[in-house]
């Protein structure tokens, strides 16, 4: 069905293969049986939220920006996150692009690079996060290009959702304060950063 659709779209062979690879990776992460998690839609909303929270809580609770945040806030953060898969070579962020979300790496390896993609600033792996400056600054432009080096999986938190959660959970304003401090620190470090490794080919 997917192949027929791509043929109708007249996609070139390279693009068709990347789409197939993306679906293969999605199956590897989520399982081939599309109905294996159907039961999640048959239980109550509150119970489903608790399941998602149990699965993802450790991912965000250990991050310094969420230090001290209560479970109600973390539960809402988990529920707002969107799962995103990336193939080797896929762009996650482009230098100069408008930032509207931050990313939490759960699988794979990504490279943060300069605009020309000639210098690697950092290697991002499971447990790392990036793009947080976009959540707290207006008209935030990306200061690095991030590409996936391997098959990677990230959870994405959008700025609009984050700001809404701060209004719902005013006591969690400390999270925004920590985020500002960390963003400021990263911005200062980026001015001093040196090449850490040669660019790896995708």
Image: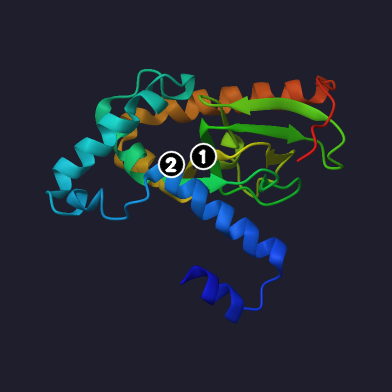
Left or right: residue 197 compared with residue 154: right
Asked whether residue 97 appears in the rendered view, the answer is yes
Q: How many marks?
A: 2
Outermost residue toward the bottom in this view: 8
* Mark 2 burial class by Cα count in 10 Å: few <14, some 14-19, many 20+: few
Cα gap from disc 1 to disc 2, whole angstroms:
9 Å
Question: In terms of sequence position, does the residue under pointer 1 or pointer 2 come before the other?
Answer: 2
Nearer to the camera, 154 or 19: 19
Residue 137 in the image, given as x and y percentages of width and height: 60, 41
Viewer-proximal residue, 112 or 176? Answer: 112
Residue 11 percent location from the top left of the image: 67, 72
| Residue 134 occupies quadrant | top right
| Residues packed near mark 1 inside 10 Å, few (<14), some (14 to 19) or many (20 plus) | many
Q: Residue at x 53, y 26 (%)?
A: 126
Q: Is residue 115 left or right of residue 145?
A: right
In this orientation, does residue 81 appear? no
Q: Tell me the quarter of the image containing the C terminus.
A: top right
Closer mark to the observer between disc 1 and disc 2: 2
Q: Position of residue 125 (x, y in %)?
A: 58, 26
Q: Give me the residue at 66% from left, 43% from top.
A: 88
Residue contact at pointers 1 and 2, CB within 8 angstroms: yes
- In terms of depth relative to the viewer, which is nearer, 61 or 5? 5
Q: Quadrant of residue 200 in the image?
A: top right
Q: Which residue is mark 1?
A: 153
Mark 2 lies on residue:
29
What secondary structure is marked by label 1?
strand
Element type where label 2 sits in the image = helix
């Amino acid at each position: 069905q997917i192949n027929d659709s791509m043929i109708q779209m007249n996609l070139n062979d390279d693009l068709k293969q990347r789409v197939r690879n993306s679906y293969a990776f999605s199956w590897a992460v989520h399982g081939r049986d599309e109905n294996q998690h159907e039961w999640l839609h048959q239980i109550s909303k509150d119970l489903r939220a608790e399941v998602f929270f149990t699965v993802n809580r450790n991912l965000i609770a250990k991050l310094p920006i969420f230090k001290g945040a209560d479970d109600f806030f973390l539960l809402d953060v988990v529920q707002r996150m969107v799962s995103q898969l990336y193939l080797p070579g896929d762009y996650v962020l482009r230098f100069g692009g408008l930032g509207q979300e931050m990313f939490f790496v759960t699988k794979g390896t990504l490279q943060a690079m300069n605009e020309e993609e000639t210098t690697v600033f950092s290697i991002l792996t499971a447990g790392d996060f990036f793009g947080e400056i976009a959540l707290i600054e207006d008209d935030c432009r990306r200061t690095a290009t991030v590409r996936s080096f391997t098959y990677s999986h990230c959870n994405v938190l959008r700025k609009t959702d984050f700001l809404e959660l701060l209004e719902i959970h005013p006591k969690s304003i400390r999270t925004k304060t920590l985020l500002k401090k960390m963003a400021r620190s990263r911005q200062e470090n980026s001015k001093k950063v040196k090449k850490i490794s040669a660019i790896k080919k995708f």
